[in-house]
Structure formats: structure tokens, C-alpha cells
Image (cartoon, coloured by chain):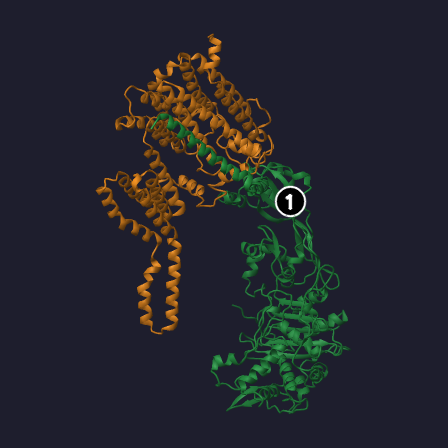
Amino acid sequence: MSANGRHIRLLVGLGVVTVLLLGKIFTLQLLSSQYKEDADRNSTVYETIYPTRGVIYDRNGVVLVGNKIAYDILVSPRQVQAFDTLQLAAILDVTPEFIRRKMQEYDKRKSSIGFQDVTMLRMIPAETYLRFDEVKYRFPGFKGQVRGVRYYPVNAGGNLLGYVSEVDQDYIRRSDGQYRSGDYAGMTGIEAAREADLRGEKGYHIYLRNSRNQIEQPYKDGTEDKEAIPGRNITTTIDATLQQYGQQLMQNKVGSVVAIEPSTGEILALVSSPGIDVEQLSDIGKHYADIAGNPYKPMYNRAVQASYPPGSVFKLVNGLIGLQEGVLRPETMYSCNHGYHFGAGHKLGCHGHKSPLNMEESIMMSCNAYYCYVLKNILDNRKWDNVADGLDHWHEYVESFGFGRKLGSDFPAELSGSIPTSRTYNRSYGRGRWNSTTVISLSIGQGEILATPMHLANLCATIANRGHYYIPHIVKASEGVEIDPRFYERQYTMVDTVHFPKLIRGMWRAVNSGPGMGGTAWIAHIDSLDVCGKTGTAQNPRGADNSVFICFAPMDNPRIAVAAYVENGGFGATYAAPIASLMVEKYLKDTVRRHALEERMINANLMDRVKHD
Amino acid sequence: MTEKAHTRQSVDWALIGVYVLLVLIGWLNIYAATHTSEGGSLIAWSSRAGKQFVWMLTAFGLAAFTLFVLPPKLWEAVCIPFYLFVAALLVLVIFVSSDVKGSHSWFDLGPVRFQPAEISKISTSLLLAYVMSRQGYRITRLKDLLLAGLVIAAPMLIIVAESETGSALVYAGFIFVLYREGLSGWWLGVIGLVIGLFVATLTLGAYWAIYLMVGCLVLCNVVMGPPGKRWMHGSVGGAFLLLMALLPSLLGWLCTLVQGRMDALAARVWVPQANESFHYFWSFLLDLKPIVLLLGTCLLSFPWLAWRAYKERDYFLAVTLLVFLLGIALVFSTEYIFENVLQPHQKGRIEVLLGMREDPSGMGYNVNQSKIAIGSGGLLGKGFLKGTQTTFGFVPEQATDFIFCTVGEEWGFLGCLLVIGLYVFLIARLLADAEQCREPFIRIYGYGVAACIFMHLVINIGMTIGLMPVIGIPLPLLSYGGSSLWAFTLLIFIFLALYRDEKKYF
């Protein structure tokens, strides 16, 4: 092979390699647009402008949640130079160890932080920030950032309002790119329910930067910048005065008060006690451990999450089903011999009252035996194949009142309670091995029935409306904020309107018969307001009975329906009835005349009675 | 002929012109890459562009001195002591140098740093030319081949010991010099195959690596094998390759079929034992991997082929079979080499290069940023000093190893075409000049120079565009740095001086 031939071959090889290189460069520069985009992303820096979060108003325009200014201290670890740790610690009101620990932590995460800013301190007060601002030239790499913080002029309860906190990785993943690390979002309550409206839209300034993240100049003189769009204000259905009054009444008690406007389903008050103090709400991160460790579980929103046995309040439902099914007529009389006797020596006890009595009186005096007969007649009706069939039909009725399922309110984290079906008993007793006496405690709202205070308030509103309800909701439609049209739709129960007046008459008599007449809720009486109510005393396996009361007023054209549930409160008339009644008085009369009762309720402390884990 | 006219004719002015152009381009781009961070002067000593200006002027002086003042015969005379001196420096630097990014290859002389590896290219080229141009040297003789190999390998190994594997890689380019001087083309083929198999095994897996190797061997046999058997080799090999290409998907289809049959049977037959035995009998099909079938077929046919090669004295087939066996061994040891021989940072670079690992902020950061810079250039580039990536410092080592990014970003594809074109012209011109020389010493040295520049060019630009792993070697004449510029100037102008000297006498 001639040497010359090899020269040519090597030249050909050189040509091939050259073509390869140029081909790749051609692909990079002319065929792919990705690198141009990357280059833009690389050298432009987006400085986020955080929008102010929407203000939350009550139904009358009172601010429940507003905004105030606080500052975060940010660090760009790569720009930090040697600095006086002691001085910085003194300025920022932290310990030198805190700063050292943070700097070490950033050093460890150096590669993942890169040239980004990380937040070292959150929500420091303005005076601390101003102190820092004067000397910040001595601390290159440290800077402050303005941040809107929530503030709460009205003590409306942390569980109702909810808190705002920094999103975690899990939240970011679920949000489909809406949130980035460092953003804040409403986590519970109204803040979470209306996050999409409240948060607004982030804006940005674009700057050109170098690879050391030093800003060089505004990109295209700021013409591409986007201003932040503030969050939409939310008008809630809450009545600030009533809510705050409810918080006050329920202090040092465990339980819940829910008030609904029957004609609209608007929630007027939603109190869960004990709750998160609004003082702690704006900086929940700091108090989180305390709150989470509190044995009374203040984070637990009892109004929509706690599943309680409704107790005698549930007799109303059974009575209505009996009337609708025709197995009970208003004039039907049953006798009560201190309870309902069944089988050999079994008895479901009752308190002392006149006997026999009709339906109206049975509501008024809350007779247990009466409703044992009613439920038995419902379940053992010949028209059903068997008791299981009967129970499932009963279940269908009960569910039409909203029980045993989520009501579908716009308030987050609502739970469904539970109403038994034939399967519940088939599972525990076996198919065909139980009968109506097995499940007789359902008649008085005990046993396998569990409902939330919101369910009970909804039941009360349903009765006030004589057979229908509106799904309870917390947000009113206002400018720019729409609510789901289903909140405007009447939800009918399976019981006809005609069956309600007699029952309501019973509830009226329970409250308005005066002391000594056998009415269970005379304490809830308010002059010139036709309050209709029903007490309940629900067994609590952990200590004293729970005190339950639902009422609405006035009897004609009701404007408010209240459910109160006080754990370990004893008889329904002991705590729940006065509290619910005071709520009604506050709402309808603005001023409460019954000062002694009010004071007794506010000062009552039942916390010692409550057993916790 | 007057002395002046003689100078004009005997000096390759075109080559010098290209050299000057490249150096100037380098200087401008160093300025572009550093003007934001180091201030805006092209000539002030405080900036790197200014320093490079000084290096440039001194390099031009060095060039003139080498070309016109130094007697060209000197180089042939001093090449042995020069080589030994540089080798000593190479060893010495390991012990006295400071640690620069893990390698010990820099002499720190106050304000100036220099890398003996740069001069070592000159001394090696000179000695190689000297050794191979002696009377009676025949590269086909093993002794002589080993001698040339030793001259190349000695500095290469010392540089590896300095942990400058990248620089050592340049010396692999001398194989082209040996090839020009008569080394068998098989060596190039084998080296190419080894590299190809290594890469294919890591990226495509053993099956396709072996498949490609078999394909290459079949192709070799068809193109270069005994003429009488080409048709047979082509058809049998082609059929085999076709089958093997379809095998993985075929096997997958078969598996689904068998699985389906088994499921159908399981649904119909309610006899667990029968079901199980059926499963047991056929399930081996599900475990069958394409690689097993491929190797099985190869190994079954191997004895028969070997017997044929022996019986028919088919030298070509025998070599093919030998290469096949070695190739299989290589493929299976590649994993081992990769996991156990290579250092973690080398492994990382190879993994990123081969796209086995997405790592834009760590190991792949440099390459990714460099690709972004070049890729954002487009056809015409963003214009001188208008690049955002290189001027704002996203690309690392932007004035030295990654200087080509600035060209790519600010001058665009046309700029790249120009620069690479200049290099290709330089190399081709060196080869052409070398071919004209009657003295083998000058020719071989010229090839050595071309090979060094070629290797630097391919490795450096290949690295910036992601075709090569990140190997920190400069782009000749363009990258910032006095010692590199001086070394390449000397490398080229020794050849020009020798070439001029030869022209003078013939």
C-alpha cells in the first residue's frame, strides 16, 4: 500500500471527524430550540412578587381575617462572607448557635441550594427588620423580604378560619405546578376552602443575572414584568358577633355549636372547642408542636368531624318517619312505665313524666318508651320483607335528612358520621339473628348512630323549614366570587311537609311550657321569641353524658337554627340548651338579657370532666 | 535567487496566516468570555485578555525566533537529551507541584504556571521522528514497533501518573503517525473496535454490542475476505443478523403467546397439578433471554467454523473468529472494568456522556451549560460581547478549556464553521507539507504535529458539544494560557523551520 494512499485515507478520516463535529454543532445550534430556551432561563432570574391574600369578611362586612406586614430573612449562602455572628444574632433576636447551625446546614446542602435564596427566619416583626436593615451592608448574602401575614381582629376561632402555612413537598406535588417551595397556602378552614380565590396570582420582576446570581440589570427594561394580582376577598356567611359569642360560651368546654340560617343554609356560626387561638394562628409553625400535643386536640374541628351519638334529638327523625310511614299518628298514645320493657326483664329506662302521652307530649317531655314503640312499628311493619328490609328503608329516610353522609358543604374536612344498615347488624349478629328489639336504642339516637354537630344543626334547619334544607355553606356569593349552584337548591327529605307542624308544636311546648309542666327545655325560653327545641342526653362511654340541644326560632319564618353539643355536659338542659338559647337571643335580639345565665355558661369549666388519652 | 525571495518562497505563509488568525480569534474570544468579570480592556495586564495579548506577542516573537534565528538542524541533534529532560520534568512535577483539581501537572513559578505535558508533545514528536527516520527502521518489525511504542508510551504513562488522563489521551493520536509510516491497518481497526464495543456495551447492553461486532466482522469478511466466498459469507451472515435483529421482539411475542396459552389453560382446566406441570414445562421460555440465544447460536456454530478455517486455510476467517472471541471477552469484562478499574469521576463523566445519567447540576453541569451556550448561538450568533451564557459566567473554564463555547454562542454556526475550517486547513496543510518533504524526519515530525493538534481539536470541541467526556485539555492556540500557546507555537514553528530548511536545499 503506497504511503500516499495512507495520506489520503488519513485526510478522509479527518474529513469524516470534521463532518461529525460540525453535524453535532449544526444540530445544537440550528435544529434544536431547547438550548435557546435554556439559555434564557439560565440568565434571567424571576423575582417573585407575592400577592396580598384576600381578606375574609363576615356576612355584615366585618373583617374576620386581614393582612399585616412582616419580614422574612433570606440568605444566599454562596454570597455570604465572613461576618460577625454575635452581632447578627443580637440584631435578629436569635442565639448565635441558631445562626451557626443554620449556616452549617446550608453548607451541607450547598449543591442543592446552588445560587438560590433560602429563608432563614420567618415573620420577624417590623422593628427587628428595621434594625437589621440599617446594618445589612455588613452582612452580604443576607436580605429581608416583605411578606403579608394574616391578622385576626375578631376571635372567630382557628378551626373555622383555618391557618395559612408554607406548602410542603407533598402539597406542591398535588398542586400541579400551582405552588413552589416557599409559597403559602391555606391549610384548614375557610383559608383552605377558598384557597383558589384568596391566594391571588404571583407576579414577577425579570432580571438578567450572572452565574453567581448577581443581578446585572432588569430584563428588557422591565417591560416583561408581571404585577401580582391580589387575592379575591371572601364574604363568609358567618356572623362575627355570633361566632365570637359562641367562642365565649364554649370556652373551657369540649364540644361544638353550629348555627344555620334555615332559609338559606348559610352557616352563621361554627364553633369547635377547644380550638386554636387566633393569636397563634398567624404563626402556626411556632405553635404547631404545642397545638398538636394538646390532649384536648384543638386542631380537631368537632363541628364537622366529631361523630357523636345524637341522643334524644334523634327522636324527632324517628317520629317524622313514623308519621310518614303511617305507623304513627299524632294522637297515638303510648304509656311509659319508667321505660320500655321488652323480653325477660330488659328495659330501656325513662325518666318520670306523665303517662300515657301523645306524640306532641312525647317530644315535649322526651319520652324514651314512646319512641321505642315508634321504631318498632317502623321496622316491624308488614310491608317490609323482614326487619332487615325495614331497617334499610329506615336508613334511606334518615339519610334523606343528611345523616350518615357528608352534607357536601364547602367547608373542608367534613366527615359523614354513620347510620347503621342491615349489613351493620348482619355483620355483628349474623343474618336473621337480630330483630327490632336488638336495635331498639336507635329509637333514642343511641347505639350505632353517629352524627356531627353540623348534621344536628342541619336537622334543626330542616325541621324549621318543614321538610327541606339547603346544604350548609360558609361562603356567600360576592363580587368575583361564585358559589356552587347546589347551595341554592332545596334538598327535600322523604317526609312530607304536613307531618312537621305537630312535631314542631311539641318542640315549642318543650321550651315554652314553663317550669314544672314537664317540658324538658324550659330554660331555653326567650320572651317574645317562639323558640322550638329538643333536648338530648347522649351516653358517653367516657364519663358523664353529653349535653345536646337543637332549637330554632322564631317558630314561624325561622331565622336561626342552632345545634349545641357539650361533651360530658350532663342533661341536654344543663349546658347545651342554655348555650343554644343564648346564641338565639344574641342573634335575634342583639343583646342578651339573661345575664345570670350567660355568666354561668361563660364561667362554667367542664374540662376536668373530660377524659382524654 | 535572492535571500529575501527565498524566504518568501520557502516559508509556508498560508500556514502562518492561519496560525495568526486562530491566535487572534482566541484573544478576542477570551476578551468576550471575561470582559464582564474582569473589566473591559483588551490589553491591560490586569485582565486575562490583556495577559493573553502579552502571551500572543511573545509567542509571535518565539515563532519568528524559531523560524528565522535558530538553526533547524539543532532539533534533530538535541531531540534525545531534550526528550529525557522533559521526561525528568514530567516526573519531577508529580512531587513538587501543587494540587490543581486533583492533578499534579503544573509547575508553579510565581506568577507563571506551566505544564511540562505541553512541551512533552514537542519532545515526543521529535524523538519519534528521529527514531523512525533512522536508517533501516521498519515498523513492521516488532522490535522497531515496540521502540516507537516506548517513545510514545513513556510520557503518556508519566502523565497518567500525574492524574492528567485527558492529556495522556492526546498521545493516542501518534497511532496515526505510525499508520502513515506503515503500521498495519488492523491496529487501527482493533483499537476502533475496542472503543466501539466499550461504548456499545455501556449504552446498548451486551446483546447489541455483540450484535454490532458480529455485524462488523461479517461486513469485513464480505468486503475484504477471500473473493470466492463473499457471497456465501454475505448471505449467511446477513440472514443471521436479520434473525438476531428480530430476536428480542420475537422472543417477547413468543413469551406473551405462551403466557396467554397458560392463562387460557388455567382458566379452562381446573386441575392444579396439570396446570402446574404445564407451567413448569413451558416457563423456561419466559426466562430465555435474547443474549442466551445469541451466544448459544454463536458458540454452537463456532467449532464448525473453526474447523472450516483450519481445513481451508482461511486466514481471514480465523482472524475473524479470534477477534470474535476477544470481543466477547471484552464485552463481558467491560462491566467489570467500568465498575472496578475506572475512577469514580471518570466513571461519572462517561456515564453522563453516554446519557446513562441525567445530572445537569453535578457531573453534567459543565457539558450542559456548554451545550446551552453553543446551542443558543444559532446560525449567526448573538454577536461579539453579546453572549449571555459565556459572559455571565455560566460556562465553567470559559476562557480556557471551554473557549469554544464563546465562539459558538457569539459567532454562531458560521463562526464554528470558520474556526473548525481553519483548524482543518491547518492540519491538512501540515500533512500536505509533510508529504512534500523528502527527509523522513521532517515528514514524521510534521505528522506528529498534525496528530497532536487533531487530537486536541477533537477532544476539546467534542467535549464542549457533548460528544466526548469532560477532559480538561485546551483548544490549541485559542484557549487562554501562555504555556499552552507557547508550546503549540513552538510545536508548529519547529516544523515550519524544518520545512523551510528542506525547501532551501531542494
Which of these two is toward me, A587 or B137? B137
Side of B134 where A118 appears, left or right: right
The chain to which mark 1 is attached is: A
Residue A195 is situated, as x and y percent measured from the top left of the image, at 64, 58
Q: Is residue B93 visible?
A: no
Tell me which corner region of the image, top left, top right, bottom left or bottom right, holds residue B146: top left
Tell me the residue that label 1 is attached to. Answer: A129
What residue appears at the point 64 percent right and 65 percent down from the top-left corner? A411
Up-down relation of residue B132 to residue A563 (above or below): above
Disc 1 marks a residue whose amino acid type is Tyr
Q: State which chain is coloured green.
A: A
**Res B297 seen here:** yes
Q: Which chain is orange?
A: B
The x and y percentages for residue B43 are 57, 22
> Nearest the camera: A143 or B167?
B167
Horizontal relation, residue A94 to residue B130: left or right = right
